[in-house]
Amino acid sequence: MRHVLRHTGKLLLSLAISAALVALLLHLTAGPGNAQLPELPAVLRRTASPGIAAYAALLILGALLRAWRFRLLLAAGTTTPPPPFGLIALVTAVRNMAVDLLPARLGELSYVALLNRGCRVAAERCFSSLSVSFVCDLLALVALIVLLALRQAATGATALPLGALLLGLSIPVALITAAVFGGVRPVARLLRALPARLTAWLHLARLLDFLTRLADAIAAAARSGVLVPVLALSLCVRLTKYTGLFLLYRGVTAASFPDLHAASFTQVMLALIGGEAGASLAIPTFMGFGTYEAGSLIALAWSGFAAAASTLAMLAVHIWSQSVDYLIGGAALIAFLYTARRAPSVRSLSASSSPHMPTDARTKDEDDDKRCPPLALAATLMLLLALASATSIWLLRARAARQAGATQAPPPGAPVAAPPADVVASTQQLTALLHGFVVWCSNRDGNHELYRMDLPGRAMSRLTRNPHVDTMPRLSPDGTRVVFVRSQLPWVSQRNERLWDVYVLDLATGAERLVARSGYSPTWTADGTAVLFERDGSSVVSHTLSTGDERVLFRAADAGLPADTTLQTPSVSAAGDRLATTLRGSRRATAVITHDGTVHRIGGGCQIAWGPGDAYLYDVDHGGRGENAIYRIDPATWRLTPWLDLPGAYSHEYFPRVSPDGQWLVLGAAAEGHEHDTADYEIFLWRIGSPPASAARLTFHTGNDCWPDVWINPTPH
């Protein structure tokens, strides 16, 4: 019991130190400028599945390469065959799992324990193969850093960080190599030179005998000629390991940290090496948490990346890597416990003939075998629990991925070859007396950009040219400017509300101005002096254009809404005292939130907005011919009244927007499909109060047209 309590106390201590270090890092890197960073659960949820899968596949490949290397070393200098490759591969996978569990890489000893107790390999063979492979790992790391430095020099970039790292590693690697290959026997001789009374008092006889056998085993490995292939395998192991971690890093940062995602290969490698170095320190942390993040943070900060984002990203990389390591390692441990008992015992001749081998070894081995089934059963139950947890997490991730929208940009489509003549005629007739224009987003030229159509002539022009997604245009009250959002990556689904920045475009000059980072779904205040937008899904922010001042107008938490609630497509009343928004989360609804936090739930639709002068609201809800229809809402009774349901094939309505004069409604409608940024929506213009069949179709293109807005000149010339 005392033994159990002591180890439990050490485990709790390591957990506490890791938690304290991680909390300290997050606290030191937090600040007002980092409020837009995603939370850790969101980062884990958004991690790209291919990155996780690639890491797992390369982890297994690396374990097989390590097992091949261990088997070469175990067979070196002896006629006794090593254990079967399958058993060594299982031991290697368990070693990979346990190596970071204890500080200073003490988890490496799991390799010795499993081979010695499970496969009856002599201890000196276990330690010699482990120590030689450790030295080769270090030499391979030095070689990898040299290759990175040469790559940097070839591109003309500075290799100073790599040079400093190489200089710092060279001396300890040289000392460790000398100690392993030339220091064991001198230590044994030095101990033998001590007075016999002193060696007996210190009980050094068994240690001296072991050190002698260990020195012989290392020397035999050096003479056997396996060091060159072992070193080559070590380099392959390093390349496999860091390639897997690099792909996992890319998967973590792709959707959450665009700046870190753009980091060079060398910068990422420095962070990964720094993290491994930190986790190897003799600091009692659990699975290296805290020390790994600190080491990688130093490397990324040296490269100029933000500390807060770097810490969060590398913490996510660490969590995912440990999750995969322990899932694979746990499965390997179960398989080893069930198979090692039936494997033949393997001992070197020196071990079997040693006078220090206990006479009751067979009895003790049989007792171990008797204890093995309960241990295997307990480990099996733990693995099943881990698999159930992993499955649950994967299902939640799959659901989140479906909700996150398309993973790549849609095809641009093509113009409709021959639009129906009667449709074109009715459009021309409806717009003949209008003086104004419509703006919207379209991917018709291969990328989502903003477009303008002048009325009445329907002349079309392209407003933006950028390799990233430009969408959600909203016209200022005077019709001179457009506020819109631009994705932080070349492609971001509109379901992802975080990776966007808010811009304002001057229609007269074409000049663009970055207004705010990490904003989404923008609109204007009634006087046009400020833009409003959603940030992090949980708040609505007002940004004054003349001063750049920002203030939060509404928060989901202030209204007592659940923590997972997001405020989508926010529309603030002209008076600024009420927010119309779509609530997403545990319960979906359109709602109006007042400044005192009162929530008036209206319906189950979306894209709710205030009409001119706050006289009414309108939104998209179910019940139309194409599933959707546009509804008008009385703000006194919250009653929904059907307003527009287009006849014909295009009757899946979305993106409604009323003109400032309250006479026109512009919208998008699809014949099939639903996704905002991939379905074939067409833009329609409807005179409010006229028959739905009189709505004019403005676009004729099979690409994606979405988020229109309209401005009609009240005093045409």
Image: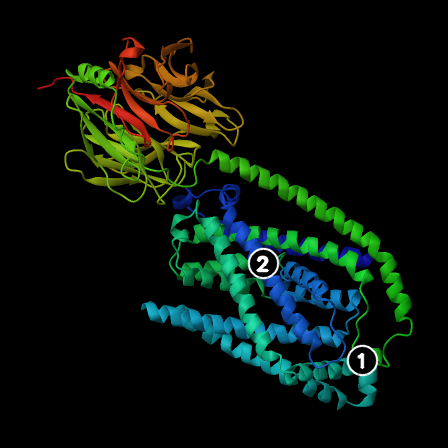
Residue at point 60% right, 41% down? 393
Instruction: Say which quadrant the C terminus sits in.
Output: top left
Q: Residue 463's x, y, as percent?
A: 21, 36
Instruction: Say which quadrant the N terminus sits in.
Output: bottom right
**Left/right of residue 598 with respect to residue 205 in the rendered view:** left
- Above or below, 515 against 288 in this view is above
**Crowd around label 1: few <14 · some 14–19 · many ≥20 (10 Å):** few
Residue at point 73% right, 72% down? 82
**Left/right of residue 346 with respect to residue 144 in the rendered view:** right
Amino acid type at circle 1 is Leu
Mark yes or no: residue 104 visible. no
Q: Residue 233's x, y, as percent?
A: 57, 71
Mark yes or no: residue 561 visible. yes
Residue annotated with mark 2: 59
Amino acid type at circle 2 is Leu
Element assignment for label 1:
helix
Q: Residue 469's x, y, as percent?
A: 32, 39
Q: CA distance from mark 2 to mark 1?
A: 34 Å
**Left/right of residue 358 with respect to residue 289 in the rendered view:** right
Of residue 228 and residue 96, the one placed in the foreground of this image is 228
Residue annotated with mark 1: 349
